[in-house]
Amino acid sequence: MVGAAGNSRIRALVTGGAGVLAGHLIAAVPAGVELHLTEHSTPVDDARRRLAEVHRVDLRDGEATAALVDRVRPDVVVHTAYRQSERADVVDATDHVAAASAEVGAALVALSTDVVFAGDRPPYGETDPVDPVTDYGRWKVEAEQACVAAVSDACLVRVSLIVALDPPDRVTASLLDAIDAGERPTMFVDEWRQPASATDLATAIWAIVALDRPDRAGVWHLPGPEWCSRFELAVAIARATGRDPAAVAEAHQADHPSVRPQDPRLLTDRWHQLGITPRRVTEMRPA
């Protein structure tokens, strides 16, 4: 497949077309890319429909997913669809997307997560063995394995928190809604992540798509450029959006009933290949 930077037009299918990252992928789509989106429980809005062809499908349905991919015949599938609460939404859906991609010879770029690591021995490199401690982390490991089993040169993009302000991502929107309602949302002071701008991630993903398949293959860690606690991030978001930072309250992992990765910090050896300098999320401002 010729990358998006080449002279040939490519057809890209992005799953999870109503999601925050998909919105930024649409906004950053390079010239020469024919864009297709999937939707399921959340419909794709009219603005996105004007820029891409939208296909309704339940990715947990293997036959329906295979039929859609066979009909679209994409050159590359960018798999961003996910829901953390159900294994089928993570593992089965990814397995079906990967198998369908392999059937038509499409390249595969699949989003994964830093919580494939336990977070007790940071930092983690792109070749380090995974050791998840949460159900979601274990499901994402299974999803990664399904991708590589079906498409041997699949690209696995592991990210930390994806942050957007305008419109806000789901977690940011929940935080701001709570502050606006006069509540004091609590955030961990002892859980550290590497938040990344959704805009920067979208740009990076299209840059990866533009690479030749052998250069694109394997694991990519695309964390944000700063390491901060969830509490610090929430305070920065409140300040950036004109809310009172003092409205955010501190919490500690020891008070949480379930095991969580404390510091799944990612090292990356591949960002430099893309020629992109990611921005500090704590310095973001709404458009």
Image (tube, grey):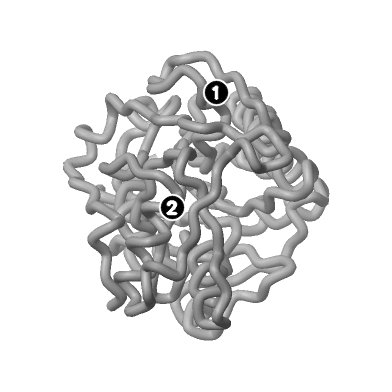
Between 195 and 10, the residue placed more toward the observer is 195
Check the image and report above or below for 172 versus 119.
Answer: below
Residue under the image location 30 percent in, 71 percent down: 240
Where is residue 278? Give x, y as percent. Answer: 24, 48
Among the 4 quarters of the image, the one containing residue 164: bottom left
Question: Which label's residue is closer to the chain start, 2 or 1?
Answer: 1
* Viewer can see residue 95: no
Where is residue 257? Give x, y as percent. Answer: 73, 40
Mark nearer the viewer, 2 or 1? 2
Residue at disc 2, secondary structure = helix
Residue wearing tag 1:
152
Picture disc at residue 274: none
Residue wearing tag 2:
231
Q: Residues within 10 Å of mark 1 (few under 14, many from 20)?
A: some
Q: Amino acid at mark 1?
A: Ser
Residue under the image location 42 percent in, 41 percent down: 193
Residue under the image location 48 percent in, 39 percent down: 191
